[in-house]
Image (cartoon, coloured by chain):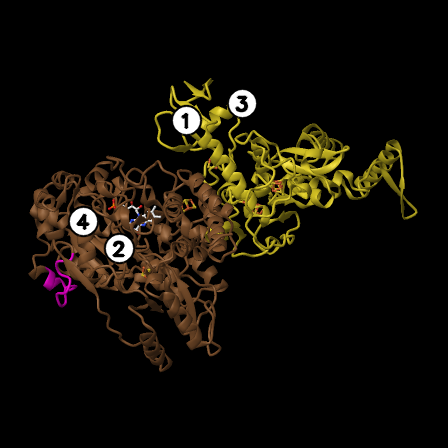
Amino acid sequence: MHLTIDGRVVEAVPGQTVLEAARAAGIYIPALCYHPKTGKAGRCRACVVEVEGLRGLKESCALLVKDGMVVRTDTPKVLQTRRMIVELLLSEGHHNCISCQSNADCELQEMAYHLGIERPSYLVESLPTPKDMSSGGIVRDSDKCIQCGRCVVACQHGVVNQVLSFAYRGSHAQVVCDDDQPMGESTCVQCGECVQVCPVGALVLKQPLENKIRPHETTATKVTCPYCGVGCQIDLHTKDNRYAFAMAHEGQWDRQPNKGMLCVKGRFGLDYIDSPDRLRSPLVRKKGKLEKASWDEALDVVAKGLKAIQEKHGPDAVGFFTSAKVSNEENYALQRFGRALIGTNNIDHCARL
Amino acid sequence: MITKLIEKKIEKIAARYPDRRSALLPAFHLVQRESGGFVGHDHLIAIAKIIGVPVSEAYGVQTYYTMFRREPVGKYHLQVDTNIPAMLAGAEEIVTHLEQALGIQVGQTTPDKKFTLSTVECLASCGTCPVIQVNDRYYESMTKERTDALLASLRRDKMPDMPVETHFHTECNVLLARRGLPNATDIDVYLETGGFQGLERALQMSPAEVIAEVKASNIRGRGGAGFPAGVKWGFLAKDTGKPIYLVCNADEGEPGTFKDRQIMQYDPHLLIEGIVISGYAIEASLGFIYIRGEFAWIANILERALEQARNKGFLGKNILGSGFDFDIVVHLGAGAYVCGEETALIESLEGKRGNPRLKPPFPAVIGLYGSPTIVNNVETLASIPFIVERGAKAFMEFGEANNFGPKIFGISGHVNRPGVYEYPLGTPLATLLDAAGGVVGQLKAVIVGGLSVPILTAQEAEGLVMSYDDCLKKGTMLGSGGIMVLNETASIPKVALRAIRFYAHESCGQCTPCRQGSRTISELLAGIVAGRGTRKDIDLVLKLCDSIKGTTLCPTGEAFAVPIEAMVTKFRSEFESLVS
Ligand SMILES: Cc1cc2nc3c(=O)[nH]c(=O)nc-3n(C[C@H](O)[C@H](O)[C@H](O)COP(=O)(O)O)c2cc1C
Ligand code: SF4
Ligand code: SF4
Ligand code: SF4
Ligand code: SF4
Ligand code: FES
Ligand code: FES
């Protein structure tokens, strides 16, 4: 099936929205409330387009493609609407990109950039709201919230933790945790899903914020979460080869194993890789003190120790506990070692937790 | 904690709905009424648990509706409506008078916790403004003297009875036929005066025949949009395997509108008959009356009438031996204008925040509980008995082509006899103004269809005929038929400011242009009215109105952008005289 967008013939599949078809063809349509994970919401109105034969403006995030449809994203009314949306959203909160954690990683800023808007032509006076820093991993800055609702849908229906909701009405509407508790005192489990979908700087991770690292400075490497057996796909963001923060792997939202979601461990628990406490070489206790040793030396100590216990107390006095942080092959080898060499079935694994 | 008794009551309410979540608003009403006038943290958690919704969502719902409170209020909560008809009738002075008499400001409670003073939006009594709602009760046509009498009585802990004189007249004897009859809310009076004959006739017809008759009458929806009712019924999704619901829209929130109330308060059986006939026609399994929360006392009138109708076999199982089963649930809103919009109403009825839904799908395909649903206004449904009993032809004897039938016009503002007047569609505005005792002073402007339609200057209103088509031709809309009359003393910038404050207060907040656009226009107009504005601000208001039109999720954005634009454009010099 084909449609024409701004004079360009574009391929589309039935069931696709105009927005999806446009994006697949590399045509820019801003969309602040739609996210592939949370679906259409019709809230931001940024994505409106004109369609031949249809009256008025249509939300491209909700409009299904039809063969032969003629869409325009560049008419004066569409551009006037986009400008108004950006100006209203900028005037609604307190946006100062210069020191915003999401600078250069913000969908509102991107939209303003496309339209060449530096500052809104009107401002509504309001007092700044203090940031909610109460949570261990997430900072909420309601002055940057554009009410898109992605986080609410994600928390209620994506990860089903049911913490976030819209409260109040009109321009007083805001996202709250439970019955308006600070996030750190709410039922939030810090999965970070809300941060993952937030288009602006209203929900950000505390780790990079505290370390003064912004997303545009980092490099993402796709890794597998070392914590449990699910094996979530993670984009590990690093700066100068050091840990910055972790996000679920972008883009493949419908792909197993984690469909772009993480739990608190994968989201916040990977900073150990740069920890000064991390063991970087074997240590052997000598006269009550741990001292650096070579692998040969350390393995000798282990072998001797295991053998002594086995001889004195029998093989079942030894147990093995292995880890999801190493590969399947290594886990297999350890299990073989336990059963065949030591002769015990006392073998367990952290993924069982 | 919530007592076992209240919990039982909530369970009983929940059983009335196909989905128990619908009991969320009733539960808030109940707990608020029975435990101190507010619902705090502990009670909220208990309610959420009983209904089975997350605390976060219950809180989101509670804080959406203005009638639900998180904090206690005084023993007597005085709520003065200050919308435009009230403003024209002197509500501002009543507010000042109350502030002085009570020694508190709006929003405050007296130290003895006896009185709390609030201002609220239109209470759908615009013909008898100013209105003070005390707890659940309306006190209408308030003057300073009557306010003093009210306060004196409340200080003695007595809710006084204060009679009001209302003005009404009917040329058609269809919708207001029983207005003025003693005991007209009683089913015996209704039956003696020809009631339920339409239903009897309908039950002898097939549902398709009833729909055909309604279609033939060309009746257009009286809720505001004027969409032909028969055509809407024809859009119902067929053979979905799901039940069909009929919802009567009794939200009556459009400022200047107080017509549906006349039917429900004075002739409830007419509405019930209309709903049962319509339910039969569309083969609905259950009907709802979604009535605004401030009308709790009218809801009681309806409940009593429903009980009488059930006892006489007009409602319930096997109605009049026809084999048709149908019942009606009365559901109270809780203070939210946007819940009059049909998809917001459905969300609200489902126990959610009243956020309008994206269309399509339309309710006739996916509506209440995901089922095909028809939403019709009170006045539309109350016209159905006449159409079915007397036939489409008789109905079309009222009015003119494309604009048939009787219509209740509510006239408020600067007229001598504000009130409700039932006239055929197509009646000249001048005739209606005469019926309402004529304009007080010199006519300056008129808003003919509720606040959401463009204002007309006196000159533009000359020769206007009150039909959907003529209003459109003259650049406005018939809307709900709520006519607000403004004389030379009215300041249009002040009217515009009050209007946009209403929309900013009522915006559901979902979409950017309405949420933030209404707030921005409100700030700009406030500056202009206060003498702080500039010429540029006037242009900005116009630019915003123009940009907002056609961009919002539901019609509310247009409902303020168009009228504000009209006020500023048509009375620009008045705005300019206020700015530097
Ligand atoms: C913001 C808004 C408020 C509305 N309020 C009401 C109302 O209070 N009562 C009503 O009947 N219709 C109201 N409507 C219109 C309804 O959406 C709907 O069109 C109507 O109930 C259909 O009934 P009808 O076809 O019989 O007129 C409102 C619409 C909007 C956009
Ligand atoms: S949220 Fe976006 S637009 Fe707002 S200050 Fe941050 S970067 Fe700028
Ligand atoms: S971190 Fe997870 S649980 Fe907490 S609010 Fe965000 S989405 Fe909900
Ligand atoms: S916090 Fe972010 S995701 Fe949530 S509504 Fe605000 S802008 Fe949207
Ligand atoms: S136009 Fe206003 S009321 Fe309607 S959905 Fe948008 S914000 Fe809500
Ligand atoms: S992306 Fe379509 S309305 Fe927000
Ligand atoms: S009831 Fe007073 S303004 Fe409508």
Residue B271: where, in percent of width, then height? 19, 54
- Which residue has dot 4 on it? B428
Do tags 3 and 4 sit on the same chain? no
Residue A202: where, in percent of width, then height? 59, 45
Q: Are marks 1 and 3 in contact (CB under 8 Å)?
A: no
Colour of chain B as rendered: brown
- Which residue has dot 2 on it? B329
> Which numbered disc covers residue A15?
1
Task: Determine the residue positioned at 30% across, 49% down.
Answer: B457
- In space, the residues marked 1 and 4 are separated at their CA atoms by 51 Å
Chain letter for the residue marked with disc 1 in the picture:
A
In the image, is residue B177 part of the stretch drawn in magenta?
A: yes
Give the amino acid at mark 4.
Answer: Pro
Mark nearer the viewer, 1 or 3: 3
- In space, the residues marked 1 and 2 are separated at their CA atoms by 38 Å
- Which residue has dot 3 on it? A26
Q: Are marks 1 and 4 in contact (CB under 8 Å)?
A: no
Q: Residues within 10 Å of mark 4 (few under 14, many from 20)?
A: some
Q: Quadrant of the N terminus of chain A?
A: top left
Magenta residue span: B176-190
Do tags 2 and 3 sit on the same chain? no
Task: Determine the residue positioned at 70% across, 42% down.
Answer: A208
Q: Are marks 1 and 2 in contact (CB under 8 Å)?
A: no
SS for callout 1 = loop
- In space, the residues marked 2 and 3 are separated at their CA atoms by 52 Å
Mark 1 vs 3, N-terminal side? 1
Give the amino acid at mark 2.
Answer: Val
Mark nearer the viewer, 4 or 2: 4
The chain drawn in yellow is A
- In space, the residues marked 3 and 4 are separated at their CA atoms by 57 Å
- Image quarter for residue B69? bottom left
